[in-house]
Amino acid sequence: MDWHLSPYVIGVALTTVLSLGVAFSALQQRDRPGGLALAFLMFAVAEWAGCYVLEANAVTIPLKVLWSQVAYIGTMATGPCVLHFAMAVTRPRRQLSLIHLALIWAIPAITVVLAFTNGSHHLIWDTLTFADDSHRILVYGRGPWFFVPVVHVYVLLAFSTLLLVGAARRFHRLYRRRALTILAAALPPWLLNGVYIAFPSVLGRLDWTPVAFAVTGALLLWSLGELQLLELVPVAREHVVESIEYGVMVLDVQGRIIDVNPAVGWLLGARGNTERRRSERGLVGRRAAEALPGALGDAVASALPLPPAGDSWQDVASEGEAPLDGRTIAWRLTPLRPKVRSQPGHLLLLRDVTVQRRAHTALQEINTLLELRVAERTAEIRAEKERGDTILRSVSDGIIMTDRDLYVVYANPAFTDLTGYTVEEALGCTVDMILGTEARPVGARAYVGEEPWRDEMQVRRKDGRFLDVALTFAPVSGEAGDVAGYVGTVRDVSQTKALDRARKSFLDNISHQLRTPVMTLQLYAHLMGQTALPDPNREYLTAMDAQIAWLNHLIQDILEVASIDSGKTLSTWVPVGVDGLVDNLVTRFTPLAEQKGLQLVVSPVPEEAPKVMGDAPRLVQALGELIENAVHFTPAPGVVALKIGVVTRADRRWATIAVSDTGAGIPATEQPRVFDRFFRGGVADTLQVPGTGLGLSIAKAIVGAHGGEITLACASSPPQSETPGTTFTVWLPAI
């Protein structure tokens, strides 16, 4: 084959390559609406253009005619494929009937057959001439059948165009952009084809339609990547989304609103159709986190994931509730993901659940009231059995009643659910028989005592599984005032116990998991400090030492908080002298105060120094947090003062330890939050004071465990006050 590379042939070849690129790209997205139709369309264009290249380079007229006949396969397939693509992207749920498919494909199929048999009837072309002197491009004289497929194709194109124009007008901006892109891509080839059909001499009697498809291929290839042409397609919006009562928002991967239904406007407070439509237009194109007001926008913003990097994203739905103008709005965020690996966007559903939540709250209040009434009126159970049964059946905890010998005479449905026994199986059995041997002490203690008894333990269900429960047994008085029986409640605390065990495991392992690496860093830093280092490296080592010290402090604070949360605040409970605590603190913090240029002053101790009951190391820790805080926030030269006192309040003696400083004080707006965990005021950032924001909360918890409290007295920040500074006073019950 003698290759001929004229501008026309090069253009047609370029069309072939671009069309194949678009076809394979669309084929990878074949599970999305329009993906498979677009792939077939571009394969047809590639076949059409490729045959033109082979025809131009064929050396004999019969071979040129053969390639022209083969090209008719792709040429005739383009029109139906365009219609299928337009239907898929505008009406993806619409299925064509067999009659419609026959009308679409019958004439193209007949035309292909006539093309291959043209030599016997000349219905498609009747003459052959060369377009120029190169004798490369044949021009076919038009037979009587030539115009039949032409009219058929243009009818299909016109209908496809109407579908896309209607979509561009009906859909919102992001959909409209995609529909207009498809129209722009389809326009060049069909304009050139129209000129070729009507005025062939204008284009040198050459069919430039395949060359124009190069522009179409480039636009579609760009659209697949940049506009995500097949990512989101509207699905019967006017019949589904518009009519449902839930608010529906379609978000793209960036969290921008690309479509809403009318219910969104009503939920956001729009009244009347005009105001609702205005609200819709104002929402589309904005980010959901910004468009949705107040807590609702914050909740949706926190639930939206970051745009995925490649294929790394999580197909996880999120849901919750948020207040809005005195109402409660339930929301659910669901990823919109086809079967291929991508994340085109999210579906956000909004629903007003104010009435349901109010009803739920009312039911919870009623349930709590019923539980209290059951405990208060156990003496009336026998006389009011029918009403009592109704009340007990509605209680969520398991409830049993026994006689004085602990034989079960009543069990509610919740009890049978917890234990696995039926009511019939429970009646006539003792408590320890149903709950297992671990519950035997319950019977013994409740039987000999006349006071309510509470405990937590593991009981064995009928199926052999053990269950963590909270048990309460209370005696029921008879008519003579003696114990006639017992009423017991069984509450499932498995989840709480699991959390406690997880917390204990955390506390057991955290020291090794956190402290060991930090100690290793400390050791390496110490060893580096023993070597001769240049001044810049020495500065780096000093900074590293500071950061390691801060990390140690953070670990200690976190461990302390975890220990407090687990109820392990105090280890001992012995008499402690307050003066001894102060002496310990002065010895410990004097070097730190002097290093910063401060004075640590202790006021005279009363002749009879007060004593308190408690854990001395814990009290030193709490007071140390206050002193360390004062040292950090007091600029040099300054004073940190300690003062011990004894005060009588509410007929009770209190030992007081006041920690005062001459720092800048605490703004009034921040004072209510100083004991909150992780709270650091603006002064801390201004002075660049290191810390975790946990020290004051730890001190308050320790003092509270001793039955005391911490009060704050703080002057306003200068220059409003002549006596700036802060005073924390620890109050402890004196003995």
Image (tube, rainbow, N blue to C red):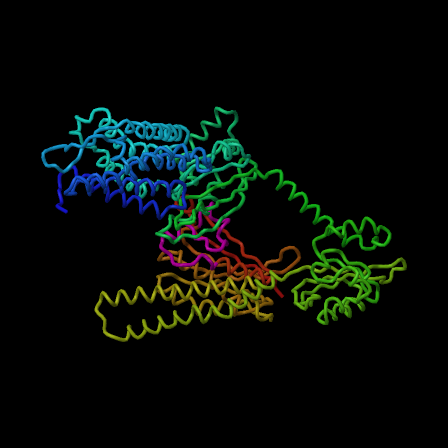
- In the displayed orientation, state which residue is furthest to the front: 120
> Residue 351: x and y, percent?
55, 38
Q: Is residue 261 above or below residue 529?
A: above
- In the displayed orientation, state which residue is furthest to the left: 133
- Of residue 213 and residue 494, the one placed in the foreground of this image is 213
Q: Quadrant of the C terminus?
A: bottom right
As for residue 667 lying within the magenta part, the answer is: yes
> Residue 111: x and y, percent?
32, 34
**Residue visible at 40% across and 37% down in the picture:** 89
The answer to whether residue 477 is left or right of residue 612 is: right
Q: Is residue 639 above or below residue 670?
A: below
> Residue 45: x and y, percent?
28, 39
The answer to whether residue 551 is left or right of residue 701 is: left
- In the displayed orientation, state which residue is furthest to the right: 480
As for residue 36 lying within the magenta part, the answer is: no
Q: Quadrant of residue 21?
A: top left
Identify the magenta region.
Answer: 666-695
The answer to whether residue 246 is left or right of residue 63 is: right
> Residue 493: x and y, percent?
64, 61
Predominant SS along the magenta part: loop
- Of residue 707 and residue 504, the one placed in the foreground of this image is 504
Q: Is residue 541 above or below residue 86?
A: below
- Of residue 15 and residue 601, the one placed in the foreground of this image is 15
Q: How many numbered markers are drawn?
A: 0
**Residue visible at 56% across and 69% down in the picture:** 615
Q: Is residue 666 above or below residue 127?
A: below
